[in-house]
Amino acid sequence: MTNQNQNPKSISKTPSVAGLPSDAALRELAKTYLDEQYQHFPEYQSLGLLPEPTEASYEEMANRFSKAYRSGSLQSLASMTRAPKSMTVAACYVRYSDANSNTRSLDQQLINVLRTARQLDAFIPWEHVLADAAISATTTARPGYQMLKKLVDSGESSPSVIIADQLDRLHRDQAESLLFAKLIKSRSRRLVTADGFDSSNEFAKVAHAVSSLQSEMYIDQVTVKVYRGMTDSFKNGKHVSAPPTGYKLVERKDAEGNVIVNSNSKVQRKVVIDEEAAEVIQRIFDMYANQKLSPAKIARVLDGESALGRSTWGPSSVAKILQNEKYIGQWKWKTTTRVQDPITGKKHVVPLPEEDHLVEVYPERRIISQVLWDAAVTRREQTSRKTNPPKGKREKSRQEVYPNMLFDLWCEKCDAPLRRFRSSGTYVQMNCPHGKDGLRGCDLKSSKSLRIIEECLLTPIKQQLFADGYAKRLCTKANDFLAEEASKPRADTKQIERKIASLEARLRRNGERLSFLDDGVAADRLLESIQSDQSTFNELKAEFARTAKANFRPEPLKVETIQELLANLRELLKDDVVAAHGILAKLVGRVRVSLGEKQGRTHTWRAKLDLDSIPALVEIGKQRDCPTTHSLEFLQVCSWTMSKELQVTIVDFPNYQRIAADAINMHDAGSPYNRIAVAMEIDPSTVKKAIEWGAKNDTSFIPSADFSVRRKLANNKTAKIGPAVVRLRNQGLTFEEIAEELGTTGGTASRAYKQYHTKANLAAVEKGERLDTGKNKRKISPDQVNLMRVMLADKGHSQRAIAEAVGVSPSTVRDEIKRMATSM
């Protein structure tokens, strides 16, 4: 017999079912049952009502109990077929509240119940032993108890007696207790407990009612005492619950370094910062507030790193961390309470009024700075449905809150943010959520690759901002405006300051008056007056700030400084999406997209954007701590701008435009069209078109071909036969011989060889050199070569005459002249 209050044996582990005792506990319960029944009814062994007390029997009985408990169905009484007809059959119920409670264990209760049954000359078969482990009697959602009610409510005459150790094992809820008593009576059954209760007694109804009331009151008293003790512990700085991630519990020690032990012989512990976990918490806040990552992305990052040895980070756990005020040293208690449904047993978290909250501030436990916390709160408010409602009513799109692309793209027709559509991995397609079905009158039915959209928008922006002379033009116009503003008299702020001081004094007086007034009409009117004055006070403060900034006389802008800021902007556009998005949002704001002209099978898009460099330069200046920032801020406050509205057609850049800059450089180095085409693996006509277009247009801002999914040559045979061509060419075969062996043409074999060495080809054409075609096997004999060289050295013969004398073509003679020139 074991004590089932011990945790390892309390509750089943695999698979877990609430209330089911563990396998070990069930085997011990079966052993206790047989030990007691063999003492009370030894004669029933021969009738087959009691199995042999062996380990196999214990295992089989535990399995039957577990199977019935999981299914919620009652076990059949197959073993009772040989029972005497005069036998009284009973059933019993045992239970304890939780794994740490000190109530009677299941087997101890079973001993008492079986002894009571023997006194009543009633036999309890194993099939009628019902139990629940670690479930409170305040709820009826107990599988064992529900099986007991099903057994009582059945139409069978047995069991005629229901036995429990005490009534509070059955219920701790007065209403359920009375309902169960009515059920027992209506089915003509008898309820008996080991401590003396008997429903057949004439005073049983009164005793039952009093007992159930006492049980319910006991639970209420225990709850009050527990909360009182925990509240007192919280006020004294003790931990009343497990600390969140970022903290740990350590032993308290006295001044001499000895561990402090309380009156219950338990080591006292205190909450301290866990340095390793605190770094992760700080990273979470930084990724959310500064890097603009969503909780889901943060969770994926932490999972990928197995942060703190965990791989169970999820969006909900990250979101809870971001809302936990304990990380700024504010520890709260009694903010919520858990209410249990008496029928289902489910517990619901209910918020408590703010006046009931207990707050203690521990500066030594702060992990997150106030600046970072405020930034996270601001970002959380932006994403909240309370301040940012869904269904087209949002002030900010998800992209603006969690940027994963460079621009904030909005549909001009229906005023909805564009969303991802049919995207996979790094390939992202964008469309309007209403365009496909024509909702809200939207006609933007097509979709575009995000790569194409961003390239088309970035190109004109770069052409405008990074063009020669832009910084000089900006400084000239801005400095003219600054000089004009400096010549104006400064606005007088004394009147505004007097109004602010007067309102501040009035608000202070009315606040003191309101604290002495009771609720009523006078208090309501005074409150309205205070609210009105507060609104006026805030407006005056904002006006004073604007006037003070307008009175500021900044230094003129310098061309070198603006050029440096523009260089920083250029670098930022190459940086990660989050950093670039923040600057582009200041630079162009929201980009409005509409449907353009039809082109091929789809339509182009038209985009409108207002290019204003001042807000972007102010932002960059703040990040770089630039001294010119004050002058730029002054221009922004005065609404001065050099903005320009851009109309952009969103369509993919043709391949010839993408390669134009490289093709021109190669051609200028002396490489012909065909050689460039082989090196770049494109058609010679495309090379020619690219060079002609590049001669008339600025190619410096066109995205390079590396960013496009370029159409390869239609003939993939060159790539397939490339390794074989190189192998045969290295053996000394001519391209004609290789072509004959591989079943192709000499031109295809030559092209395959050249394209096999891509890097070497590109390096050669950039220098204007010939492409490597391998070692050529001479088709003429050494005697012919010697004769040709002798006649060339004589210089008295023409190339045609030499060719006729040697028996070769004139081109062979010219090739030999080149060889002789390179060998000298």
Image (tube, rainbow, N blue to C red):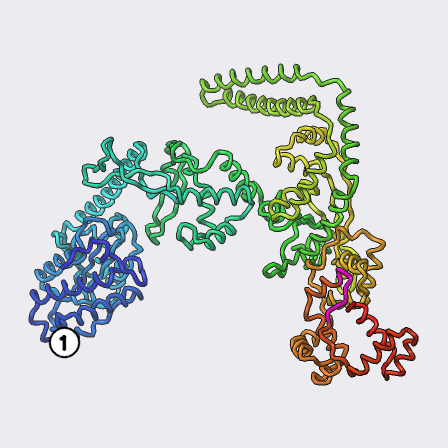
Q: Quadrant of the N terminus?
A: bottom left
Element marked by disc 1: helix
Q: Which residues are magenta?
A: 765-772
666 relative position to 236: left or right: right
Image quadrant in which you'd find residue 476: top right
Q: Between 370 and 540, which is closer to the camera in this rendering?
A: 370
784 relative position to 266: left or right: right
The reply to whether residue 177 is visible in this rendering is no
Q: Main secondary structure of the magenta part?
A: loop
Give the image location of residue 174, x and y in percent: 26, 47
* Disc 1: which residue: 82
Q: Between 14 and 173, which is closer to the camera in this rendering?
A: 14
In the rendered structure, which amino acid carries the disc numbered 1? Answer: Arg
Q: Is residue 809 above or below residue 155?
A: below
Q: Between 195 and 107, which is closer to the camera in this rendering?
A: 107
Give the image location of residue 256, x and y in percent: 22, 32
Image quadrant in which you'd find residue 150: bottom left
686 relative position to 261: left or right: right
Residue at x-position 54% and y-position 43%: 384
Q: Between 230 and 507, which is closer to the camera in this rendering?
A: 230
Residue at x-position 70% and y-position 77%: 717
